[in-house]
Structures are given as C-alpha cells and as structure tokens.
Image (spheres, rainbow, N blue to C red):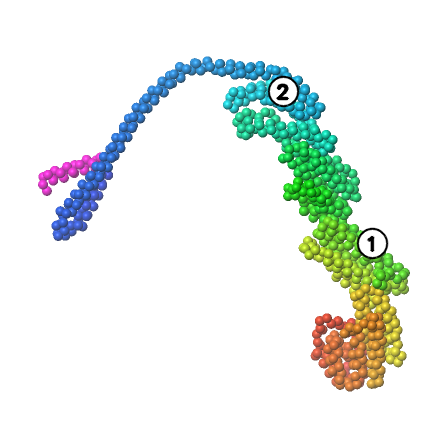
Amino acid sequence: MSAGDQRNGGDKSEDMVSRAAVWPEVERAELLARGAALKWASGVFCRPEHLERLSQYRKRESQRTSSIHTRLKSMVQSYLEGVGWGLEQLREARTELREVSQTLQKAGVEADANTEGVRSLERLRELSVSRQQLLAAVSNLPRLYAVQGLVLETERLVESRRLLEAHARLMDLERWQDDILWQLGGADGPTGSAVSADDQELAAKYFSGVQQLVDALGKEMWAVVSSALALAPQNPTPFVSAVRIVEREEALDRALLAQRGGGGGGGRPLPPGRPRCWRARFFQVLEEAVSARFRSVSYLHTRGPGLAGHLSALQHAVMADLATVRHLLEHCVPPHYQLTAAYLKATHHCLHTHLTQVSSWDLESGEIFAVLNWVLHIYNSPDMLGHPELVTEADRAVLGPLISSEGLEQLQSKYVQSVRKSVSEWMLKALQVELQDWQRDQEPDTDHEGFYLTSLPTIITQMLEENARVALMIGESLRDQTIQMGLYEIENLLNRFREALVEFGKEHLKDPSSNRFYLHYLLASISNCVILKQSTETLQLQQSSQSAGHFSRTPPNPLAALDRAVRRACRLVMDQLLLDLQPFLPGLLTRPWLVQGDPTPKLCSILEHHLELHGFVRPPCCQRLQEEAQWLMVVEYVRALMQKRFVCRSNEDRKQLAQQMLQDDQLFRETFHSLEGGGSEPDVTPLDLLPVLADFIRLKDPGMLTLEVSGIAAKYPDISEEHVSVLLDIRGDVSRDVRAAVLDLLEQSAPPLPAGYRPIFTDILVPPSTTVFCLPTARCA
C-alpha cells in the first residue's frame, strides 16, 4: 500500500472515529456495509481466474458509488433549500407579530383612556329609557283614562247581547293593553325586553276589567251556541254573530302567532290569554249542547214498555235537530266547519254512551228486541243515517258502530236467555194443560183429517215459530240462536212428557176403570209427537248452515227425545192391548180350543177394536202400532204354544192342531188386512211364523224333522234348542235318536243374526221342564 493510500486510510479511519463519536448509527451502518462488501467479494473472487475481472468490478462499483453520491448531494441540497425557505418565513412571522403586539399595546392604552367617557354614557342611557317610558305614558294617557268607560260600555253591550259591537270594543281594549305592555318592555329592541313585574302590575291595574269582559263575552257566546238548535229557527242572528266572533278570534290567534315567529320564542311575545282557540271551544260547546238535548228527552218510563217509546222519541228528536242543522245552521257557518258532520259525530257519541248504559240494565226480551231493532235497523234506515241527504255526511268508518260487536253479542245472548225463560214457562204450562186433558171423561178432539189431537203441539209449534219469526226481524244469527234454544226446550219438554206418560201408565194400572179414555189419550200423545217431529224438522231446516259453529254446547237432539217418547207411548198402548187380551190367552191351544175354536174370534174382536183406534194416529206411527200389535199377537200365540197346553197323541191330533193354527192365522190376517184398507201386505210379517210351526207339527215323517228344523233355523236364526225341544214334545212322536240328531244339527248350525233382523223367539220364554230328575237306577228306568 502506498503512502498516499495509508494517509487516505488513516484519514478515513479518523473520519470514521469522529463520525462515530457524533453519530453511532453511522459507524454501525458503515461496519455492516464493509461486512457485506467483504462477503460479496469473497464470493465473487473465490478462484484465481476470477481476479481477471477485478478491474471491471472496480469500474462498475465506482460508477455506482458516484451515482449514489450525486443523488445524496441532490437530496441534501433540496433539504437545505427547504430549511432556508422555512427560516425565511419564520423571520417574516416574527416581524409581523412584533408589529401586531405594538398595535395591541396602543389600542389598550386608548381603551383605558376612554373608560371614563363610557361611564358618563350609562347615565345618559338610563335617562333615555326613562324618557321613552314617560313618552309612552304621556301618549297613552288618553287611552288609560278612557279604559274604564270603554269597559263599562262593553259590559252593557254584552248584557244586551250586541255581541259584535262588544267584541269590537274588546278588541280595542286588548290592542291598547298589548301596545302599552310592548312599549313598557322596550319596543325599540330587536326582540323586545321582558316586562318587569311592576310594569305588569301597573298594566293589570288599569286593564283589570278586560279579562272579565272576555269571560262574560265567551259565556254569552257559548250560551247562544248551545241554544242555537232551539232559538235559531226564530232568530239566527245571535248565532251568526257568535260564529263571526269565533272567526275573528281565530284570525287574531294566527296573526299573533305569526308575529311571535311561529311560536318559537322570538319576535313579539303573545298577549295574556292567547291563543284562545275559540273554534275548538265552539265544537266542544256544540257537543255539550247535543248531550244536553239528549238529557232533555224524557227518561220517565224508560224501562219496560216505555223503552220503545223512548227510542222513538230519540229518533224524532235527532232527526228534527239534524233538519235544523242541515237546513239552517249549516248556512250560518263557513263551509269548512262541516257542521252537519260534526253534529252527527256528537250525536253518535251520545247515542253510543246512552245505549251502552241501557244495554247494561236487566232488560226483558221485548226491551232487548226494541234496542236491537233500533240499533241494527232503524238507526241505519232511510229514516235516520240512511237518509239520502245524510249519506254523504255520515262517514261510517269514522263514526264506528253504535254498539260494539261484543255488546251486540251480549244483548243477543240476553235476549235468547230471556226468551228461553218465557218459553220454558209456557211449555211447562202447556204440559200441565195436557196432563189435565188426559183426565177428561171424553174422547180427544180430532183434526180435519180425523186424527186425534190435543192443544200441546199447536201451542209449542206456534210459540217457537213466532219466536223465530220475531228473531229474524233482527237478523239470521239471532234467529238461529232462538231456534237452537227452542230445540233445547223441545228436548227438555219431551223428556218431561215421557216421564208423564210413565206416570200416566202407572196410575192407570192401579185403577184401570178410572179413565175410560186412557188408550185414546195415549194415541193422541203419539199423534202429537208426529206433529212435533214435523215442526222440529221445519225449525232445523230454517237454520243457516253457518250456525252450527256458533254454539259451544252439545247440539240439541229433540228427534231422539221424540223417538224415546213415541216408543214409550207405543209400549203403553201395547201393554193395554195385552191387558185386554189377557183374559182370553189362557184358552189358546187347549183341547176345548181345538174342539170349539174359541177364543180366537174374541181375540180378533179385541184386536179389531184396538186397530180401529190405531187408525186415529197419524202415519207413520199408525202403521208402527199395527206392526207392534201383530208382533204382540204372534208372540203371545207362540208363547201359549210353548206352554205345552196341548200335546199330540196321534197323527190325527197333529193334523187337527196344525189345521186350527192355520185357521187362526187366517183370522188374524183377515183382521189386520181389513184395517189396512185392503192394501198389499209386507213381504215378511210375524204371522208368517204360524204356518211354519203348523207345517212342523203336521209333518208325517219324523225323519224329515232334521230338514224342517234346518229351514226354520235359516228363517228364524234366534230359535233356540229349548224352543225346538218343546215343539218336538208337542208332536209326541219323536224318538230319542231323531231328537238328538235335530238338536245336534241346530247346535252345529247356529247361524248369526242377519242385519236388520228383529228376533222373535227371544221374546218367547220357554217354561222350565217339569221332568223329575233322578239317578239312572234300574227302578227309575
């Protein structure tokens, strides 16, 4: 290394040391740079042949270093220029601040010099305010001296109901009062200053009568408005004056609110008592007058029959007042008042309140009907709100219902309960009359068709139909509820009616001779049930299809109660028939019966008499009774056969027994057929059993009994082994083997009862066997 390089290296080392002392970060950065350069050089010149390119690397690095130095110099130069410009600005700002500070010092000196002058102006300001007040007082002295006289004059005008003139004087007084308060408060200010308490007290002392005048004028005005409906037809002038005053006051309120700046607190303050809002007060007084008109309608005798008259009086009063408002008062007010609509609204509100009170009373059915009819029909009819001239005025959506839907439902429920109480009482009375008729010693009345009839179904039918017709005048819903109630009551009545029939039968059994027409009234009861069934079905058809969901209770079932009552009455009729037949039944199927033929003709005579009486019963119960009588006769006949009063000993006996049974069957058929008007007989009748039994008895070959019993069991599946065993005993010629075969066949077949089959052998009890039980000993055998 040359001496120059050494010096340079030494200088650089010294520079590095000096810079490191000032900036340690520079030393660190230079060390890092040197380390990176050494690392790069060791990687590039790791082989001898790489040293040939050392000059190229040196040249390239020298150029890069020169470029970096150039850029650094340029950047440092720009920084130095910016710093210089900033220093120049700071010098100029310092110069300006120095000048401002000097100016402020001069201004403070001058302000201190003018303080005494400002203090001398305070007294001048006070004198100026006092002068303004004195000037206002002097200028208003004529008004202040005239206030009392103007107040007295205005009072006289109010008392004489010269309302427009009184209001003009009152407006002058209020304007004077407002001006004085404004001047006392300092009218020259931008918004006026607040009036002191002393000034307010002084002004109130001078204008003490103004507020009393306002109250007196308002009292007279509202008296005129409240009595307008009564007095306007004779003299509408006071009402017109009151309306004009209301409009003046509304205009004043709007003007004063505008001066005050829309009520935001700025501008001229509102005078005392403003805004008055007399237009709103006008409609309030009108509503109070309507309420008073309602109270003036007489409430005497409102309850009871007088309620309908009271509602009629309300209707006429409302329509008369509406005519006055529509034809007279409506022309006395501005169009935007819509006086008719306002009166309608007030009237509707008063009616709503009054009818709500009326609905809360304990009303009878007639009173509830009057209220419902008035609310639902009269009020909305052309006679009231539905009037062509009122349709455009009455906004139903705004008015709302006269009585709420819940109130209407409660009224309808109360109506139905009241009617139900009355219907129940009437039905009970009708039943008592019916029971008294049963004790009469004469035959029941007949209708135009010749059927027995009493007053019970007519009373019940007319009562229920009348109630349904009246309820329909209110609406279908009430009609359906009334019909539903009537069906419940019919069901209750029929239950009591059936109990009465049972007691009637018991009393007759105690003393059969006490009532000659017992059977006749039983038949009349059956005819009554037929009529009641027709009326009940008619009532059910009148109900709308939607009414079923309106009733939470179990639906009434009067038809089932009717069926129970008819079945009980038919049973009693059959009991009486059996009682009349009983003396002759023991003679059936005996040896004398086989020889003489008695008592079958007597039984047929009794049957004929009963069947003739059955003809007084309305169909289809007439046919039902004849069927029951035929059924009873066959059951009793076969029951007599089962008692083994006659046991055949030979073929001749079996032949005679079968022949006599067929003759009896023919007599029975002729008896029933003659009373059916010669019509065709039904396909299957209980009498068909007698020829079957006769064929069984007269069968000559016992070996064919198995086949015969099989046919009987197929036709009458309820026949039991006991019945067949008795029939075999009556034949008297059946061996043990045949009997065992027949009974085994019957036990094995045992077909089920077909649908719709009415068992007959179930009603025929077989008497117990009289055979003595013994042990199978040789002696007994």
Residue 179 lies, in percent from the top left, at: 58, 21
Q: Which residue is mark 1?
A: 429
- The local crowd at label 1, few if under 14, some if 14 to 19, many if 20 or more residues have their Cα within 10 Å, is few
Viewer-side residue, 341 vs 724:
341
Residue 315 lies, in percent from the top left, at: 74, 41
Q: Quadrant of residue 754?
A: bottom right
Which badge, 1 or 2, comes first in the chain's sequence?
Answer: 2
Give the main secondary structure of the magenta stretch.
helix
Identify the residue at image location x=83%, y=70%: 677
Identify the residue at image location x=21%, y=43%: 33
Q: What is the magenta range? A: 1-22
Q: Quadrant of residue 196?
A: top right
Viewer-side residue, 174 vs 580:
174
Identify the residue at image location x=16%, y=47%: 57
Q: Could you tell me which quadrant the N terminus lies in?
A: top left
Residue 326 lies, in percent from the top left, at: 69, 37
Label annotation for residue 207: 2
